[in-house]
Image (cartoon, rainbow, N blue to C red):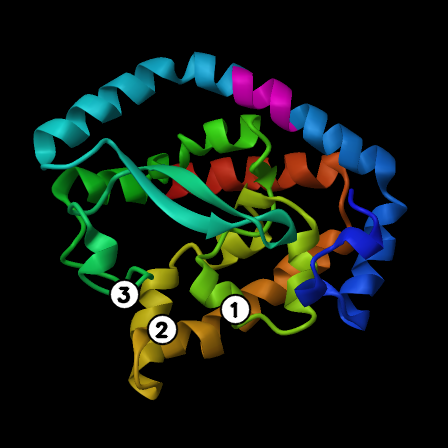
Amino acid sequence: MKKWEDIPASMKNNSVKKYYKILQRKKVSRFLKRTFDIIFSVVGMVLLSPVFLILAIAIKIDSKGPVFFRQERVTRYGKTFKIFKFRTMVENADKKGTLVTIKNDKRITRIGKLIRKCRLDEIPQLINIFVGEMSFVGTRPEVRKYVDAYTDEMKATLLMRAGVTSEASMEFKDEDEMLNECVKKYKSIDQAYVEEILPKKMFLNIKYIEKLNLLTDVGIMLKTAISMFRR
């Protein structure tokens, strides 16, 4: 964890400092979290390699474009990185519409609908976890456009690596449907997301910092797995 004076100036405010002090006291939890991430990302990549291969073939057969969707996202200390996801939309979908996906989005491919339903598009993020860009549990990484809309308190989530899943991810697993409802009150999907969805998600993500420990992470991962099978 960086010293306070080395943290980006854009993150230095009283709200972030409060959570910085909390994380400082959780040295053992942070160490165990990263150790867990390294070990189980390697195990996951080995065990799921057949799934990687099957999905890669299915994606290539179903539509033109690369197997992976690579998009710049924001993680710890505001650093950008390229996230790995299985491509579930048409090629260059992010240039043909909004940066968030709504229900019945026409850009989603046939195999993409199945992959998204089972959340299998997130599997390649095991690579991001292994190299230290992400963690199994943490705030879902946003594009810079939405991070720029963070309040001072929301910036506290940037003290930790972005995550594959979180309590907020489970609570908003039907985010596309929620956006469909919210957009009726706003000028655009982006505005609906920033003003309606994002604050609620970030409230849960900030609370996670206070209860950070390995058992909490394992519990969230198990709940995520259970919710996937229930869909």
Q: Position of residue 171 (x, y in %)?
A: 51, 58
Magenta segment's dominant SS is helix
Q: For the residues marked 1 and 2, what is the alpha-carbon distance in whole angstroms?
A: 13 Å
- 3 and 62: which is toward the camera: 3
Q: Position of residue 136 (x, y in %)?
A: 57, 36
Q: For the residues marked 2 and 3, what is the alpha-carbon distance in whole angstroms?
A: 7 Å
Q: At 70% from the left edge and 64% from the top edge, which residue is drawn?
A: 11
Secondary structure of the residue carrying numbered label 1: loop
Identified by mark 1, the residue type is Asp
Identified by mark 2, the residue type is Asp
Q: Locate residue 192: give its quadrant.
A: bottom left
Q: 10 Å neighbourhood of mark 1: few (<14), some, or many (≥20)?
A: few
Q: At 46% from the left edge and 60% from the top edge, which residue is drawn?
A: 144
Q: Locate residue 156: give its quadrant.
A: bottom right
State the quadrant of the C terminus: top left
Report which residue position mark 3 lands on.
98
The answer to the question of whether label 2 and label 3 lie on touching residues, with beta carbons closer than 8 A, is yes
Q: At 67% from the left edge and 47% from the top edge, which residue is drawn?
A: 160
Which disc is residue 190 wearing?
A: 2
Q: Which residues are magenta?
A: 37-42
Q: Foreground mark, 3 or 1?
A: 1
Q: 10 Å neighbourhood of mark 2: few (<14), some, or many (≥20)?
A: some
196 up-or-down from 227: above or below? below
Secondary structure of the residue carrying numbered label 2: helix
Q: At 47% from the left edge and 70% from the top edge, which residue is drawn?
A: 197
Q: Position of residue 102 (x, y in %)?
A: 27, 63
Identified by mark 3, the residue type is Thr
N-terminal label among 2 and 3: 3
Q: Position of residue 27 (x, y in %)?
A: 86, 38
Report which residue position mark 1 lands on.
148
Is 156 on the left-hand or right-hand side of 14?
left
Secondary structure of the residue carrying numbered label 3: loop
